[in-house]
Image (cartoon, coloured by chain):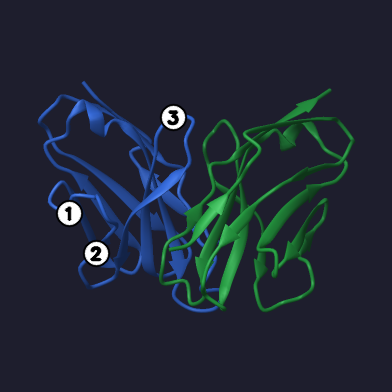
Chain colours: A blue, B green
Amino acid sequence: GAVVSQHPSRVICKSGTSVKIECRSLDFQATTMFWYRQFPKQSLMLMATSNEGSKATYEQGVEKDKFLINHASLTLSTLTVTSAHPEDSSFYICSARPGQGDLETQYFGPGTRLLVL
Amino acid sequence: AQTVTQSQPEMSVQEAETVTLSCTYDTSESDYYLFWYKQPPSRQMILVIRQEAYKQQNATENRFSVNFQKAAKSFSLKISDSQLGDAAMYFCAYCAGGGADGLTFGKGTHLIIQP
């Protein structure tokens, strides 16, 4: 149980285009999903917290207009990188927290590697 | 704000031996949780073990155990009988009680298993 998927696993796009990444909890309902960013050989940095049916909460320094987050259902959150630039190239990982039971453990998706040319 | 520090960028251990990875943290909260996550080359984050701050007993999961020293704000991971499949990046992580906040991660320790 507690499986989280992400799509796509890898994407290459041209500078100036927008890219959407989907995060799904497959066998549980997730009232909260989180988006992290990981640069090569670095740790995970929290970008934003996504709660179903409400606006996302962004960490300091993360541009909300650039990284659009939508959490329209209890099993799906999307991250859209708008007008992507080469510096946005990174590994993006989502996680999901169950709505009941073990509230503190987060289950991670396999990540999405974004390369902006 | 909470911080998590892993002071060992890299550790190496012989197969079948025991290794301990260090982690310290800083928080003003009384209700919190600590985790160790493993990230193999596939980059999939895998939960290794978790510890509730209110529990005095150290968590154990098969070959993995922690030494939780609350007063010292220390949370080390011991891996016994190391196996080749244990080779990975290991991240120590913190979250406040309730789980509403995201995880704060340490910088990670790269664990190498020598055959």
Of callouts 1 and 3, the N-terminal one: 3
Q: Answer few, some or many: residues within 10 Å of disc 1's Cα (few below 14, many 20 plus, some between 14 and 19).
A: some
Q: Answer few, some or many: residues within 10 Å of disc 2's Cα (few below 14, many 20 plus, some between 14 and 19).
A: some
Residue A20 position, x and y percent, is 22, 44
Q: In which quadrant is the N terminus of chain A drawn?
A: bottom right
Q: CA distance from mark 1 to mark 3?
A: 23 Å
Residue under pointer 3:
A40
Q: For this view, does A12 lie left or right of residue A66?
A: right
Dot 3 falls on a residue whose secondary structure is loop
Q: CA distance from mark 2 to mark 1?
A: 9 Å
Q: Answer few, some or many: residues within 10 Å of disc 3's Cα (few below 14, many 20 plus, some between 14 and 19).
A: few
Residue under pointer 2:
A56
Q: CA distance from mark 2 to mark 3?
A: 26 Å
Could you tell me if the residues under marks 2 and 1 are in contact, i.e. CB atoms within 8 Å? yes
Image quadrant where residue A7 sits: top left
Dot 2 falls on a residue whose secondary structure is loop
Q: Residue furthest front?
A: B72
Residue B100 position, x and y percent, is 41, 72
Q: Residue at x 70, y 64 (%)?
A: B72
Q: Tag 1, which chain? A: A
Q: Residue at x 43, y 63 (%)?
A: B1
The kind of residue tagged 1 is Lys
Q: Tag 3, which chain? A: A
